[in-house]
Image: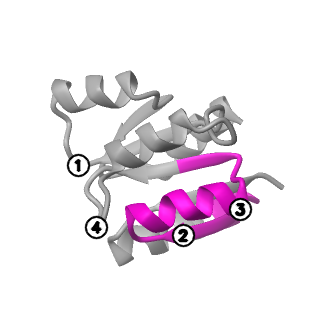
Amino acid sequence: MSKILVVEDNKNIITVLRMCLKNAGYEVKTVNNGVEAVETAFEWKPDLILLDIKIPKMNGFLVCETLKDEESTKNTPILMLSAKAEEEDIKKAYNLGAEDYITKPIEPKKLLAKIDEYL
């Protein structure tokens, strides 16, 4: 069973993502800030990370950069999730090493297809 770390601070989105991913057969762990995201990624070793950009304590760009700079997590696929659809943000995410950029609202079928692509 693949492990997915969800980094999101919106309770409603967390609930939807957790249900969607668990129903698809994934083991899911959720955290709601950037510091916890980095700590959990190092300890839990997820197979994929769904990472919101606007999160407390350390934004998603910094989390992505930190994880991609570390040997133990540099190959873990990171899919950025954001309501921000500006070209500048999308380019920044890819430049920092994110595998993909998904804009909110998230459509579960499309999200699961993206996840399958990277696992």
Could you say which disc has been placed on residue 56 in the image? 4
**If you read the primary sequence from the N terminus, does the residue marked by circle 2 or circle 3 appear first?**
2
Hey, which quadrant is residue 75 in on the image? top right
111 vs 105, left or right, is right
Marks 1 and 4: CB-CB under 8 Å?
no
Q: Mark 1 points at which residue?
A: 83
Separation of marks 1 and 2 at Cα, in angstroms: 19 Å
| Identity of the residue drawn at 51% across and 44% down | 111
Secondary element at tag 4: loop
Separation of marks 3 and 1 at Cα, in angstroms: 27 Å
Which residues are the magenta region?
21-49
**If you read the primary sequence from the N terminus, does the residue marked by circle 1 or circle 2 appear first?**
2
**Residue 57's x, y, as percent?**
30, 66
Marks 2 and 3: CB-CB under 8 Å?
no
Marks 4 and 2: CB-CB under 8 Å?
no
**If you read the primary sequence from the N terminus, does the residue marked by circle 3 or circle 1 appear first?**
3
Hey, which quadrant is residue 64 in on the image? top left
Secondary element at tag 3: helix
- How many other residues sit within 10 Å of disc 3, few (<14), some (14-19) or many (≥20)? few
- Three-letter amino acid code at the position of disc 2: Thr
58 vs 4, left or right, is left
With respect to residue 100, does 25 lie above or below? below
- Three-letter amino acid code at the position of disc 3: Trp
With respect to residue 38, does 100 lie above or below? above
